Amino acid sequence: MALRKTTLVVADDDPQILKLITRNLQLEGYATHTATNGQEALEAITSTQPDAVLLDVMMPKLDGFAVCQQVRQFSAVPIILITARGNDQDKVHGLDSGADDYLTKPFSVDELLARVRAVLRRATLSQVTQASGELPPLRIGGVQIDFAQHQVTRDDIEISLTPTEYQLCIYLAQNAGRVLTQNMLLDHVWGAEYTGEHHMLQVNVNRLRRKLEADPTQPHYILTKSGVGYLFAAHPQPE
């Protein structure tokens, strides 16, 4: 029986860019499903359950931000947003919508493939490396990480995390009580090529806090060490 190819949904309303992306992904051995507007993208993601998604931001019917937000209601699939806007505010908006990464137009084929490999690698790590059952569950305050079940709970309620959020959470928790610099976190969770992309880390920390903390503005678990990095409290204060 033939192995299932890694499958990606690619959505862009520019036919030339869509052809460029899909052709190069196919040459790398990926299977692709295409969409030319946000509604088609949402339907393709729902029906095909892909391994990753590439979404253009500026699309008719639904833009990439809206698609991303809707997908996050039912799936943790890795999402890369493609945008012509290169400023940090738009990048943060995209990440805050639930995207895992972004590509800024114009981009090279090498950069495209590197970003795809990176999100797929993080998803694979999230599913496999901690799911061996060799590590016992880790409990810190009301938070518990069950590595065998690939599950994070707070006060016995399961928290839905994207693969990136899960990797960030377990790395912080496994180093509870230790300050981890921003570049240490970026290197471990995203890869060495992401060193210096601090907005990527900050947005994901904020997303994780919104899911983990009773009051994200007054965190008890994930603490900021100004000018250095972040710390998962070894003994969280009672909330």
Image (cartoon, rainbow, N blue to C red):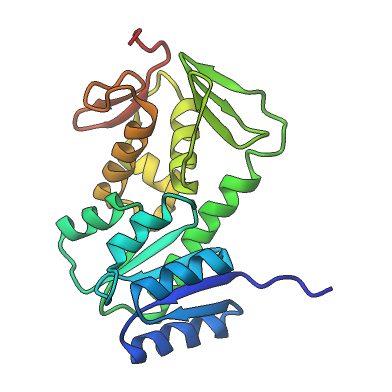
Q: Residue 98 at x, y = what percent? A: 35, 52
Q: Residue at x 54, y 53 (%)?
A: 123
Instruction: Please tell me which residue is depicted at 33% across the width and 43% down the height of the picture.
Output: 204
Q: In which quarter of the image is the N terminus?
A: bottom right
Q: Is residue 94 visible?
A: yes
Q: In this view, does 95 lie to the left or right of 29?
A: left
- Please determine whether, in this image, residue 102 is positioned above or below residue 20: above
Where residue 234 appears, x then y in whole percent? 42, 15
Q: Where is residue 152 in the image (x, y as percent from the top left)?
A: 53, 31
Instruction: Quadrant for residue 56, please give it.
Output: bottom left
Q: Nearer the viewer, residue 228 or 168?
A: 168
Quadrant into which the C terminus falls:
top left
Estimate the x, y position of residue 75 in percent, counting from the top left: 49, 53
Q: Can the viewer see residue 99?
A: no
Decide which of 7, 112 is in the foreground and name it. 7
Q: Which residue is drawn at 42% across and 72% down?
A: 41
